[in-house]
Every structure is written in C-alpha cells, then in structure tokens.
Image (cartoon, helix red, strand yellow):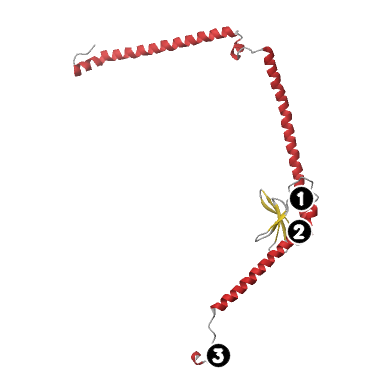
Amino acid sequence: MDERKSDHLKPAPPSLQAAIRRARVESAEQSQAVADLREAEVVRLELLLEAIRPVLDQTPEGVELFDPGIAYGERPRLFLDMIGFVDMGHDRRTYRFFQDTRHGRVLIAESALIERIVAAMTNYIARRLVEREQALASDWRSKEAAANGAKPAARGLRAAGAARLKDGPGPPADAAATGLPFKGRRWLTAIGDLFSFLLLTLGSIAFIALVCFGAYAAWNAWGRALWTARFGAPPI
C-alpha cells in the first residue's frame, strides 16, 4: 500500500543538519538565559552592597574586619568579611546571608526584601565589633597579669643575689646539713673514699684467691688423673 502512495504523501527523511541547527539554537538560548540570570544576581548583590555601604562607613577608623566585595563566578556572592557572605537562592530573587563557623555554615537570614538583609547584616557587624573589643580587652588583661606576676619574681631574684654578694659564698649544702666545718667535711670525705678503695681492692684479691683455690682443688681431684690418662705425666 505504501509503495502505491504518491511522492507528496511520503514522509521526508530526517535531516541531521537541521537537528544540529536546532540544538545550537536551543543551547544559545539556554546559555543566554543563564547569563541573564547571573547578571540579574550580580545586579541585586550590587544593590545590596550600596544599601549596606552607609553602615560600613560608620565603623570605627582602623578596624579592618570588613572588606566588602562581590565575587563573580558561577554563583556570585557578596562577601562582607572573611566568614560572612550573601548569595541568591534558587529562585534568583531571595537573599541568603551565611556565616562560616567552626561548626559549619550557618544561615543567619533569608528574605527577598533587601531591607531585612541589611538589618541582619547591621546586627552582624555590631556583634563582630563587640567580639573584637572583648578579644582586645582579654589580651590586655592577660598581658597586665603576666607583667604583674613577673615583677615580684624579679625583685625576689635581685634581693637573693644581693644577699649572696653581701655575705659571700656560703658552705656547701652537705656541710651545712651535717653542721661540720667545710675543711673537716672534706677530710672525712677523703677518708671515706680511701676506705671504699681498700674494701674494693681486698674484695678483688679475695675473689682471685678463691678462684685459684677452686682451680687447684679441681686439678687435684680429677684434673691430674685425666691429664695422666690422656697425655702422660702431669706438668705439676
């Protein structure tokens, strides 16, 4: 039946070139849509940066905690400092304010209204300034306590040194403990060392004598007979 149909009724064969052109058009439209969404995110973050700028201008001079700026990338972010930033939600309209902590990332505020995010960022800036003041005060107290503890110790060391210079060198500790004069203690030490040397020498001589006596007894007991049986007349 199909072979009998006229040519204008037969379906046209699929065209690969036409399919490629359609795919390129769809990809370009999708890329353009993604680029438009990213540009919209950047614009919203720039508006937020302009809104929070007057608050940052009120921070004390010399405080370098806050350095706001937008990081352009696949997901743009507005960084308030090293650990606080704002990005956009999946709908590309909701602001999300995060803080990185030692326990992980914490969501501080989330809203589509820029005023609420500005209020949350203002409270965050205030807390960070208070934490900085407390850290500086704690560091100042620790340094003051260390300095106050070192002064009495230094005065005690100086007083002890002055007393030793004034009274001259004292007797050794062992002489002071026994109550004997230093010279007498020295003679007693020398006599004790000599007595220890004599005991050690006599002990060595006694040990050598015992060894010799044992060897002689063994020779008389069975050594002489064994020598005679194997080698002939003994030497001694």
Q: Amino acid at mark 3?
A: His
Residue 51 vs residue 179, the one in the foreground: 51
Label placed on residue 5 = none
217 to 110, vertically: above or below: above
Residue 222 vs residue 25, the one in the foreground: 25
Secondary structure of the residue carrying numbered label 3: helix
Left or right? Give the position of 223 relative to 121: left
Q: Is residue 183 visible?
A: yes
Q: Amino acid at mark 1?
A: Ile
Q: Which residue is mark 1?
A: 125
Left or right? Give the position of 191 relative to 105: left
Residue 139 vs residue 195, the one in the foreground: 139
x, y (%) of residue 170? 64, 12
Mark 3 → mark 1, Cα distance in angstroms: 75 Å
Secondary structure of the residue carrying numbered label 2: helix
Find residue 153 and report its image quarter. Answer: top right
Discs 2/1, front: 2
Discs 3/1, front: 3
Residue pictured at 71% horizontal, 21% vertical: 156
Left or right? Give the position of 102 relative to 127: left
For the residue carrying disc 1, how many other residues have a C-alpha within 10 Å: few (<14), some (14-19), or many (20+)?
Answer: many
Mark 3 → mark 2, Cα distance in angstroms: 62 Å
For the residue carrying disc 3, how many other residues have a C-alpha within 10 Å: few (<14), some (14-19), or many (20+)?
Answer: few
x, y (%) of residue 108? 73, 54
Q: Which residue is mark 2?
A: 48
Label placed on residue 8 = 3
Task: Tell me whether circle 2 and circle 1 mark residues in contact (CB < 8 Å).
Answer: no
Mark 2 → mark 1, Cα distance in angstroms: 15 Å
142 to 127, vertically: above or below: above
Residue pictured at 74% horizontal, 29% vertical: 148
